[in-house]
Each structure stands twice: as structure tokens, then as C-alpha cells.
């Protein structure tokens, strides 16, 4: 989802509706590392930490039942409305050979200028973005670059001590 703003995207979110992207599981398999519980289930539907078993099973939905329902909404829009392959029939996405995946996409285009005046879409999202940016936490509007780290003042004596400990 991308929401336009006056100077480019005001928000851009591109994510999987599963607890983790499939690529993290394939990377864990390649590294011969376990995956955390809660990422996937095996072919019998049992939670697993084995990435190979996970690849034969299914990814777990993000955010529990609400995330699962959101995933179904995406399924309806991406497969149901387009007549493309549904998630039950998608073949491996990371395989080097084979036919196209026939995945569907739905686009909903909204004119951000349809609501003229001071209460525009950009103004509304801007108010939310300002609150998030000024709340002091790590939250941010998706697509907005991470906050820049401010320089830290280090007294000269402490810096000299740190360099001496390092051997510089």
C-alpha cells in the first residue's frame, strides 16, 4: 500500500501477512539454523523450529486470528477478484525453474486530491505521522526512513580514557 504525499510517498508498506517472510526460513535452512517457534508449522500442522519441515508445511499468520483474517482479505483481493491461483495452489516461489506463478494483484487507486481544502488525505496522514515522529519511541510510518541518530557528547577525558583502554 502506498499513500501519496505532497513530496512523494507519505507512507509505503509492503509486507507479508505471515509472521515472517519465506526468505528468512530459506536462509535459516541454508545456514542450517533453527527457526523460532511461531514462524511456521510442519506438513501435519505442528509448530516447528526446523526450516526444512517449515518449507514442507506452512507459515504462521502474523498477529494471530486478526492477521489470519487480514490474510484472507488479501487472498480475496489478489486471487478471488483476479481469477489467479489461490494460496493453496501456489508453487514454490524460490524455485529457479518452472512456469510463472500466476499470482494475482489488485490495485485500488484513490485520487488524493478528491477531498479539497485543509482536511486532505495528506493533511490527515501528516497529523498521524507527526504524532508518531514526536512520541519519543521507535515507531514510524512505514516507508519513512529511520530517525537519524544525534551525535553524543563525550567529554574529552572520557574519550581519552576509552582510547587508552583500546590501546590507540
Image (cartoon, rainbow, N blue to C red):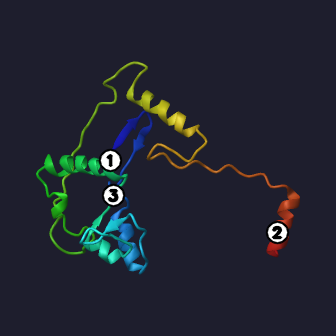
Which residue lies at the image location 29% right of the left edge and 30% below the top edge?
111
Foreground disc of the pair 2, 3: 3
The quadrant where residue 1 appears: top left
Tell me which label, 2 or 1, sits earlier in the chain.
1
The quadrant where residue 131 appears: top right
Residue lying at the far left of the rendered structure: 83
| Mark 1–mark 3 CB contact (< 8 Å) | no
Foreground disc of the pair 2, 1: 1
| Mark 2–mark 1 CB contact (< 8 Å) | no
Q: Position of residue 134 (x, y in %)?
A: 59, 37
Residue lying at the far bottom of the rendered structure: 32
Tell me which label, 1 or 3, sits earlier in the chain.
3
Q: Nearer the viewer, residue 161 or 21?
A: 21
Structural distance between the alpha carbons of marks 1 and 3: 11 Å
Which residue lies at the image location 30% right of the left edge and 24% below the top edge?
114
Q: Nearer the viewer, residue 24 or 7?
A: 24
Which residue lies at the image location 16% right of the left edge and 52% below the top edge?
79
Secondary structure category for the residue under label 2: helix
Q: Left or right: where does residue 163 sit relative to residue 97? A: right
Q: Which residue is mark 1?
A: 66
Instruction: Determine crowd level at label 3: few under 14, some 14-19, many 20+ residues with C-alpha closer than 10 A.
Output: some
Amino acid at each position: 500500500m502506498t499513500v501519496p504525499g505532497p513530496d512523494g510517498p507519505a507512507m509505503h508498506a509492503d509486507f507479508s501477512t505471515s509472521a515472517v517472510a519465506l526468505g528468512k526460513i530459506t536462509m535459516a535452512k541454508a545456514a542450517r539454523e533453527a527457526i523460532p517457534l511461531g514462524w511456521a508449522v510442519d506438513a501435519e500442522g505442528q509448530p516447528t523450529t526446523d526450516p526444512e519441515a517449515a518449507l514442507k508445511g506452512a507459515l504462521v499468520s502474523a498477529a494471530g486470528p486478526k492477521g489470519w483474517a487480514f490474510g484472507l482479505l488479501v487472498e480475496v483481493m489478489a486471487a478471488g477478484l483476479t481469477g489467479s491461483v489461490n494460496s493453496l495452489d501456489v508453487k514454490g516461489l524460490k524455485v529457479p525453474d518452472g512456469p510463472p506463478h500466476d499470482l494475482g494483484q489488485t490495485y485500488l487507486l484513490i485520487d488524493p486530491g478528491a477531498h479539497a481544502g485543509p482536511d486532505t488525505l495528506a493533511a490527515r496522514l501528516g497529523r498521524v505521522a507527526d504524532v508518531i515522529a514526536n512520541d519519543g519511541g521507535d515507531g514510524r510510518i512505514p516507508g519513512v526512513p529511520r530517525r537519524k541518530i544525534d551525535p553524543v557528547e563525550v567529554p574529552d577525558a572520557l574519550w581519552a580514557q576509552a582510547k587508552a583502554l583500546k590501546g590507540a
